[in-house]
Every structure is written in structure tokens, then in C-alpha cells.
Image: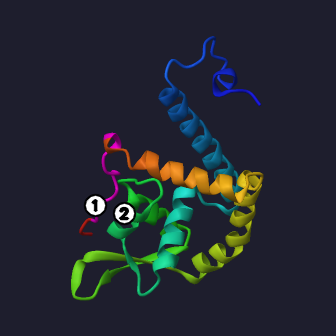
Amino acid sequence: MPSLAQELRKRHEFALPEQEATLNIVRTATRLIEAGERVLKPHGISGPLYNILRIVRGIGGDGVPSGEIGVQMVTPTPDVTRLVDRLEKLQLAARSRKEGDRRVVLVRLTPKGRRLLTKLDPIIEQMHRDTLGHLTPSELRSINELMVRVRDSPALGKPSGCQPTKD
């Protein structure tokens, strides 16, 4: 199994183990995202669109404020409105105004959106098994624990999408 330096065809090893770890995380995340996009593309959606559909389904109820969607996205984006526009165009989600506070825009799944998620559930689960199933439960726990520790570094600050907004 080649090291990251070999994979990147670097002439020398990394000067700092922290640099190698950072680049390993980025390289691995990129490959996992690409695997997800390959699975989702035949169904006409991207990773961020899928993430929004999952968030809305997970919260349920009469709809989810779009600001809350931005807070819960795996990869925070300032452009939730544009993504919801695409979901509406695909007839996978619909928007409405909250009764009592017309400033708040609620997003809910359409029946078509629910059907798509039901269809994708086993496909996405299989993708996760395919990409990480070769690791032991103990290794997976270790990765998860280490990623939490990395994200908790004071040097990283707060995630950009962590503050709820008024819609």
C-alpha cells in the first residue's frame, strides 16, 4: 500500500506528520465524496441535494426552516436557497411560509422526494459498506473518535454553517 507521498508522486516525504495527516484527510474525503456522487448521479441529484433531503426527512413535521438546514449540512454552504430551488425544480421538495412568522421559509419533502430517499437508502448503505466495510468495527470507532478530536481543535474555530439564521 503506497504512502500518500508516493501516491502524490512526491520526491520527498512530508516534513511534518501534521501536514501528511491533513492531506491524507483531504485526499480521503475527496475520494469518499466522489464515490457518493457516482452513486447519486444516476438518480439526478448531487451530494448536497441528498444531504438536504435527508435533513428534511430526519426532522419531519410540517417543514424545516432553511436556516436549520444550513446548520445541519455535512458540508456547510451559504447557498441553501439555491439548492432548495433545484430540489423544487426536480419536484423533490416544496417551500412554504411559516404561519405566524412569514419571514421563515419551511422546506418539506414531496411524495416524489420521499420515494427517492426510500429508493436510495439501501444504495447509500451499500456504498458505505463498499467503501469502509474492509475496516473492523474497532478501526471505524478509532477513525470516528480521531475525526472528532481533529474537528475539536481550537485552531479550526467554529464551522461556517453552525449559526442558525432567520429565513
Q: Is residue 123 left or right of residue 159?
A: right
**Point 58% across, 56% down: residue:** 46
Q: Amino acid at mark 2?
A: Val
Classed neighbour count for the residue bearing mark 1: other residues with Cα under 10 Å, few (<14), some (14–19), many (≥20): few
Task: Give the mark nearer the N terminus: 1 vs 2.
Answer: 2
Q: Which residue is mark 1?
A: 163
Protein image colouring? rainbow
Helix, strand or loop at mark 1:
loop
Q: Is residue 154 left or right of residue 34?
A: left
Which quadrant holds the C terminus?
bottom left
| Mark pair 1, 2: CA separation | 6 Å
Residue 17 % position (x, y): 52, 27
Which quadrant holds the N terminus?
top right
Q: Which residue is mark 2?
A: 71
Residue 161 % position (x, y): 34, 56
Q: Amino acid at mark 1?
A: Gln
| Residue nearer the viewer, 157 or 39 | 157
